[in-house]
Amino acid sequence: MSGMTIGRLAEAANVGVETVRFYQRRGLLSVPSSAGAVRRYDEEDLRRLRFIRRAAMAGFTLADIAELIRLDATEDRPRAAAMAAERLAALDVKIAELEASRAALARLSTACGMGEQGPCPILEAFDPD
């Protein structure tokens, strides 16, 4: 898949062209020189783009991703492992919050389904007044 246009690169990574451009503006993805009117991207660009997307899906910020990319070049595994541990801890907190929200919503849903009179507990729970 050598010599891809930006559209083909975006399609191969399952992102939009504007996402590719955004990552380029942020310095996470290089802008290839053009040999003519069209810039061409290679497999390394696709690998980097997929890495960025996967890291973002894991919850790393763009600043974190930039640091991970720099760490890859220096092979600083201890720092990369520390960043992963920090991210795992943050994910554990988020998962606990989501599980608590799910349990509360399940209780409200059950209460709403059992009652036949008065306002629905779900609506009461979400009404600020």
Image: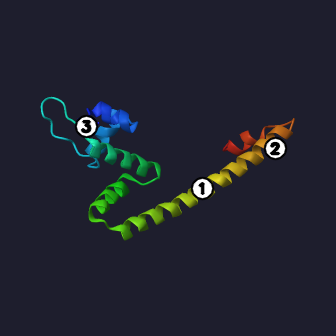
The residue where tag 1 is placed is 95
Task: Name the residue rendered at 31%, 56% in the picture.
Answer: 69
For badge 3, the amino acid type reads: Ser
Q: Position of residue 90 (x, y in %)?
A: 51, 60
For badge 1, the amino acid type reads: Ile
Furthest toward the bottom, the residue is: 78
Tell me the mark number nearer the camera, choosing from 3 and 2: 3
**How many neighbours does mark 2 have within 10 angstroms: few (below 14), some (14-19), or many (20 or more)?**
some
Task: Name the residue rendered at 25%, 41% in the picture.
Answer: 42
For badge 2, the amino acid type reads: Ala
The residue where tag 3 is placed is 2
Tell me the mark number nearer the camera, choosing from 1 and 2: 1
Furthest toward the left, the residue is: 36
For the residue pair 84 and 127, the one nearer the viewer reads as 84
**How many neighbours does mark 1 have within 10 angstroms: few (below 14), some (14-19), or many (20 or more)?**
few
Q: Classify mark 3: helix, strand or loop.
A: loop
Which quarter of the picture shows residue 8? top left
Q: Position of residue 114 (x, y in %)?
A: 86, 40
For the residue pair 47 and 25, the one nearer the viewer reads as 47
The residue where tag 2 is placed is 111
